[in-house]
Each structure stands twice: as structure tokens, then as C-alpha cells.
Amino acid sequence: MRRENLHSTVSTPIAKAPMNLDQQPLELVCPACGHKFQQTLGRLKEDPTIDCPACHRPIQIDAQGLRDGLKPVEDSIADLRKALKGFGKR
Ligand SMILES: [Zn+2]
């Protein structure tokens, strides 16, 4: 099953994976060329200007957009934490 495949490719047990939002990849779309790429949140917080890997134009990430993009991530991490809590109990 798909879950089994995923498990075998991830060497770190999920319970030990760093729950660090800074390592969370976000999908970005270049406004100039439409190229989609991913950047980690930590990188964006450090410097909200990124060069598009396709056209090399600098892209300015606005804080509000970043927060909007972050909300579902935070929600899913909260869900994951809840799930892990129940999971570790045995
Ligand atoms: Zn681009």
C-alpha cells in the first residue's frame, strides 16, 4: 500500500522527525514566469526575497501571503501532533 511505500523511504521515524516549521517547504509560484518551486519557511523568514530558479528574477514574498500559506501548515501540524500523541500511547 501507499503508506507502506512511504514508510520505507523515510528513514527517520515520524515521531522523531523535527517538528520545525522552519523546515516546512512552501510552494511558490513565480509571478514573472509562473514557475513553481519550493522553498523552506526558515529560508523565507530569514530573507523574504528569493530569486526564481527558472528566470532568476527576485521575488518578494509578502508577509501576509506567507501567513496565509502557513495557516493550513500549522493546522496540519497541530493535527499531526494530536495523532502522534495517540500514536505514542501504547
Ligand atoms: Zn520566474
Image (tube, rainbow, N blue to C red):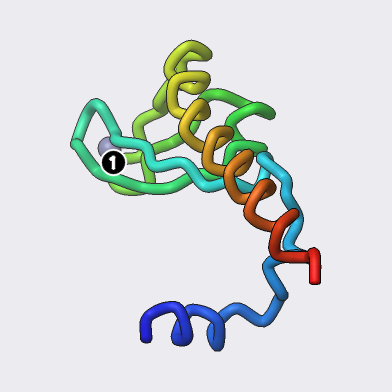
Q: Nearer the viewer, residue 39 or 87?
A: 87
Quadrant of the image for the N terminus?
A: bottom left
Type of residue at label 1?
A: Cys
* Residue 81: image location, x then y, percent: 68, 48
Residue 22, by quadrant, is top right
Report the residue at 66% width, 40% height from top: 21
10 is higher (above) or lower (below) than 35: below
Q: In the drawing, does residue 6 fall left or right of residue 43?
A: left
* Residue 32: image location, x then y, percent: 22, 28
Q: Nearer the viewer, residue 30 or 63?
A: 63
Q: Which residue is mark 1?
A: 55
87 is higher (above) or lower (below) than 11: above
Q: Confirm if mark 1 falls within 8 A of ligand 1.
A: yes
Q: In the drawing, does residue 81 fall left or right of residue 3?
A: right
Q: How many marks on residues?
A: 1
Q: In the drawing, does residue 31 fall left or right of residue 90?
A: left
Q: Nearer the viewer, residue 61 or 76?
A: 76
Quadrant of the image for the C terminus?
A: bottom right
Query: Crowdedness of circle 1 by 10 Å Cα count: few (<14), some, many (20+)?
Result: few
- What is the residue that sits farthest to the left in this orientation? 33
Residue 31, by quadrant, is top left
Report the residue at 51% width, 29% height from top: 70
